[in-house]
Amino acid sequence: MPTAIIADDERLMRDQLRLRLGQAWPELEIIGEAKNGDEAIELVDQLKPDFTFLDIRMPGKTGMEAAQVIGSKSHIVFVTAYDSHAVEAFERGAVDYVLKPPEHERLLVTVERLKTHLNKPALDVNSSVTAMLSQLAEKMTAKAKPAYLQWIQASIGQDLRMIPVEEILFFRSDEKYTCVQTAKYEALIRKPVRDLAEELDPSLFWQIHRATLVNVNAIEGVTRDIRGRHLVLIKGKTDKLEVSRSFLHLFKQM
């Protein structure tokens, strides 16, 4: 039975990748998980997996640094959230990759590639892919703009969803949870709005209340109720989101 380990500093992402791999390749046994590059190196030495799934950015040793230490001990599969330029670098290199969040159809392509490697010796990343990794590292370093959240890990009942932020209409918090509302469904997270406001792109999400963030592209208009409160209307929804006085200045340009 083929074996693998998963290295990612986000537990929910490890859970999601484990789930998706189980669906795409039921015979693959996940025999270990690591939270950083150093742990991944130790697990490879201990468990000798056929494949090692490495997140590129992790505390301690990054996925790229860990891959160079692992060398030919295991087939490397990078897990990345980076753009098409990074993907092009992977396509030219001798390693495989999985895009975050892992999608079933794309993962099936990766699985077929990995199956062809199963009976072949792993490539030494130090000798075969160092140049590609260096180019990718330079591109990552050159991106000086803040790394805003690109997706939200949220729960719907017992299921975990990876939701691209551009699909989210608004966030609304109560004392314990924050509702994540999309056009099709509602999900829940535990992160409060005050934290989300610091992690989301402010040009895409406006905080209009201490408990509410709204996607600018989802705003249909603003109205007033009989009490004089300003309410944001959401495209395709009946929700009306109250605007606090301290945030009214956001709508002067509308």
Image: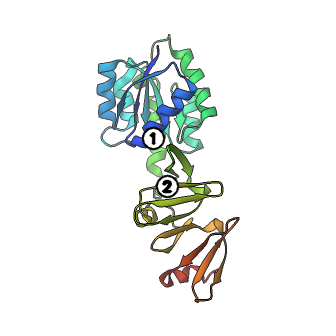
Q: Residue at x 44, y 37 (%)?
A: 15
Q: Residue at x 50, y 33 (%)?
A: 19
Q: CA distance from mark 2 to mark 1?
A: 16 Å
Which residue of the protein is positioned furthest toward the top in this rendering? 119
Vertical placement of 189 versus 82: above or below? Answer: below
Front: mark 2 or 1: 2
Q: Amino acid type of disc 1?
A: Met
Q: Position of residue 100 (x, y in %)?
A: 52, 41
Dot placed on the residue nearer the N-terminal end, 2 or 1: 1
Judged from the image, the secondary structure of the residue bearing numbered disc 1 is helix
Residue beneath label 1, please? 13
Q: Amino acid type of disc 2?
A: Leu
Q: Quadrant of the C terminus?
A: bottom right
141 vs 45, nearest the viewer: 45
Q: Position of residue 99 (x, y in %)?
A: 54, 38
Tell me the tag on residue 188: 2
Mark 1 crowdedness (10 Å alpha carbons): few <14, some 14-19, many ≥20 = many
Vertical placement of 118 versus 152: above or below? Answer: above
Q: Position of residue 172 (x, y in %)?
A: 51, 66
Vertical placement of 126 versus 224: above or below? Answer: above
Is 72 placed left or right of 27 in the picture? left
134 vs 123, nearest the viewer: 123
Q: Position of residue 158 (x, y in %)?
A: 49, 43
Judged from the image, the secondary structure of the residue bearing numbered disc 2 is strand
